[in-house]
Structures are given as structure tokens and as C-alpha cells.
Amino acid sequence: MRDYTCFIVDDEDLIIQRLELFFHELSLRDRRFHLVGKANNGLEGIEEIVKLKPDIVISDIVMPRMDGISMIEQLKPTLPRTQFILLTAYSSFEYAQRAIQANVLEYIVKVPLREADLNRALDKAAGILNEVKKKEAEFQSLNVSVLENKYRVRKQFFNELIRGEIPSHRASDFANRMQFHFFQANYRCFIVEMNMYESFRNDYSASDQNILRYAITNIIEETVMNGGSGVAADLSDNRFIGFLSWENNRSDLETEYDCQALGGQIVSHLHQYLNQRVSVAFGGPHRGWESIKQAYTEAHNVSDDFYYHTEKVVKTPMHRFHYHNDKKEEFQQKLADFLAGVKRKVSKEELEKAFADLNHFVTNYKIHKSIMAPMLQDLYRDITAKFKTGNSLATDASEFPMKFMTFREQLAFIGDFTFEYVHTGQLLHRVEIMSAMRFIEKNLKQRLTLEAIAEEVNLAPSYFSSLFKKTMNEGVISYINRKKIQLALELLNVQDYSLLELCEEVGIVNEGYFCKLFKEYTGDTPKQYRIKMTRYESK
């Protein structure tokens, strides 16, 4: 049941006292209405009402300094949802006409002042306020639905466009309908790529992934619009596409600086608001929607450099890597030497040294992702083949993900995989998962991250995430959330915590997110759960 705040404006002390008594008695039988303030004239009323923003204002008409209707006329633009009830001792057509023009809810004679009239007016105001709130909620829901459909259409349009599946006239018509006028000016395409995407897929349900992707698109576009003109869309898998244009002409140096600044803002905002780590790659300048496919290809090529970065970087055409693809055969020989030297019972230190040597070579001579990734793919398949006899992990080797990892992640993944693979039978992964579970339990009231837990058990984050889900049939984040809600239930069974206190006790900052998780795991909101517990205890 919703509460309503009320405010009184009247220059007669006796009327104010009478209304204060009325609200006091009303609170004993109807707790919806709360008196939050009072004033003796219109000018004082405006100052206090703007500050308090009450739902309902009860005001006299004739007052010194400013009459009640003039006060309402000034307040209406600022507080359009506030309901106004007028009190008068005069029957004047002029007052009634002005009250109607000011859209006043009720016009009550105050001599004598009848409680029945006040009750009726307050109930009417509550009904209107409820209806307004309902309409606003419906409108907000409609807006969200429209936005979701808009982004869905954009995703399909840009995916088809960069694949060359849309004829020129259709692309032009769509761009005009969506008011993408910046394509006629100089623009640049950029790619936003999610870091740690395998962990993202393991740790969030499909519905939560969709919500986060929608939110990521929103934040990218808002960031772009703050610095110029542009648009953003979900592309596929771990990637988003964007286009931006500046009104005035810029030199190459200015454009480079602006791209770095905007890319940095996108990286920062997504980490700050959604705790998502991304990298951004910009292509070169283009003009006209006919060049979109070429603009995308350039940005996509620049984004290939992400393979040799860790996370949260901004790349432009002026700062590309130089690739030594002629070193492919030499690196292949190093992989063959490594495979030949791997023996069963090899120590962790020996493996780390071998992989450090491989990493050192690639640091000096980077080989393009399109060549390097298949070589590493072949390496862990060769490791599987070498130790497959009697190895229970043999059938799972092809399932290990590498598509969305950086070079260092792939190398660390293969290192952890190799160590466990050649030691099959010792159940090493169970020891590490048990250590992770103990660490989570010990730090459950803190804000836990995948990276911190993986570091605690000395595994690469991507490999740890995959291994945890394979072992526990549950993602790391899902496991942590479930444990936090279990802790919340234990606390509620001991004493009646407020929502804020519960959030603090289990280490979840956002109250709305806590309520969502609580209902997801228990079927009830915290408030509903407390009511059920109270009923159970009273039996």
C-alpha cells in the first residue's frame, strides 16, 4: 500500500491546528497519509513545497503576500504530479474559474470544515496518484520494449550490412528512417570487444547475458553521443559495433587524440557501471553509408591486435603491431620441441619455464592471430594424443574453449591443462576447486572477483572458470551468488535484518540486484520471506 505526503498552507492558525488534528486522527485509522509540513502564506508555501515535493497540498485561497491559486499556478510546472485541494470561505465565481484553469483537484468550503469532505478529497487524490504511477510504469515498460526492439533491429541491419547482404537502396532508406545522418559526413567505425568472454559465458545465464549486452550497447551509445554523433549495436558473440562522427574537421593528430579519449571513456564507463572489461579498436575515416562495410573491415583488422594485449586497451590504425609471419616455421619447431620434452609427472615449475620461453619468443616476434591460434589449437590436441592411453580426460580435450582468448590466456590455459592432463589420477583439479570454495566461504562477505579467486588457486582465470563449471556444474559467479543468498537466509532466521543491513552482511552493494537474486533462489522477495517466517513462528 502506497504512502502519500501532505502539506498545509493557510494563514489562520486555528485552521492549521484543526488540520493537524485531523491528520493525527486519520493516521490512527488510515496510515497512507502523512503530514510533512505547513506554511502561513503562498510565498512561504512555494519555498517549502518545492523543497519537500509533497504528493498532496491543501491550501487556503485568500492569504497575505500571495493567494493560494497564484501559488498553485507557479508550482504546477515544477510539480505536475502533485494534487492540490483548495479551502475557501468565499463563494466566488472568479476564484472557481481560476481554480478550474489551474487544474485544482477539489474546492472545499472551510466554514464549516467537514472531515467527510477532506476524506473524500484525499481518497480522490490518492486514486489519481495511483493511476498516474500506473501509467508511468506502463509507459516506462513500453519505452524499454521499444528500445529493445530498436537495438534488435539495429543488430540485424548492421550484421547484414557488413556481410554485404543489403542492397544499396534499402540501406539508404533504413539510415534515413533511423536518422543516421552522420554517415553523410566523415565518420569512423569502431569495434568494442569484451575481455574474458569465456568467463562471461560460463558465469551468467542466457537471460542475464542478454540484459548485460543490452546495457553495454546503451552505455557505448550514450558515451559516443556525449562527444559527437553516432550509433552503437550488438554485433555478435563478444563484439559490438559503433560509428561516430564529429561536426568540425580535425587534423590526423586531433582525431587520434579524440579516438583515444573516447575509447578510454567507453572502457572506463563499462568497467565502472557494469564491471565489464572491454577493448576498443578504431578504423580510418570514411564518408557515406556505401563505405560502411569497408569501414568495418578496417576496424576489424585493427581489433586483431587485441590478441596480444591483456585487457582494457584502445587501438587505432596509427598504433598497429608489426607481425613476423615469416617466423611461423621457427615457432612450430619450438612447439614440437616442447611437446617432445613433456613427460608424465612434469613439475609445475618446468612447465612454467617452458611456456615462459614460448611467450618470450612471441613477445619479440608476433605472429598474426589467424596463424598463431590454429598452431596452439593443434598443440593441446597433440598433448591429448600423447597422453590419451588410460586418460579419463581424453574425450574432453576438444571441448576446451580457445576462440575468444588472447594469446597469453591461451598459453596459460594450455599450461594448466597440460599439468592436470599429465597428472591424471591425482585429482589435482579437485584440490584446487576445494581451495577455491574455501576461499569463497572465507571471504563471502567481500566483493569477490573471478580473477582474485583464480590467483588464489594459481590458475589462469579462463581455465579456472571453465574447470569450475565442469567440476561443479555451475559457474563461479552463480555459485558465489547462491552462497551469498544462503548466508542471507541464515541471517534472517536469526534476527530481522533490514534490506540494507542484509546487503552489507553478504557483500552485495546494489539492493535491487540483491532482491533479484533473493527471489531467483527462494521464489520470494526478502519482505515476502520475512512475512512467511513471522507467520510460521506465530503458529
Image (spheres, rainbow, N blue to C red):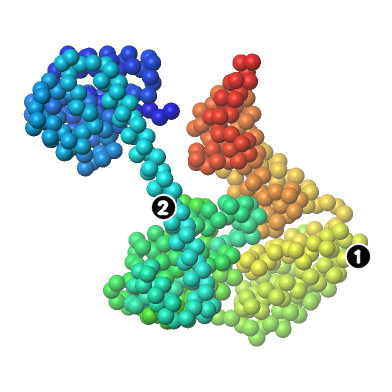
Compared to 374, does 66 lie above or below?
above
Residue closest to the eye, 130 or 267: 130
Residue at image point 37% right, 75% down:
183
Can you give x and y, in whole percent of width and height, for residue 372 in the image?
Answer: 67, 76
Residue at image point 39% right, 21% down:
31
Circle 2 SS class: helix
Give the labeled residue for mark 2: 143
Can you give x and y, in whole percent of width and height, for residue 339 in the image?
Answer: 81, 72
Can you give x and y, in whole percent of width and height, for residue 137 in the image?
Answer: 41, 43
Residue closest to the eye, 258 or 358: 258
Q: What residue type is labelled 1?
A: Thr
Q: Residues within 10 Å of mark 2 (few under 14, many from 20)?
A: few
Q: Is residue 438 left or right of residue 79?
A: right
Compared to 354, does 45 lie above or below?
above
- Label for residue 389? 1
Quarter occupied by the C terminus: top right
Residue closest to the eye, 84 or 79: 84
Residue closest to the eye, 97 or 320: 97
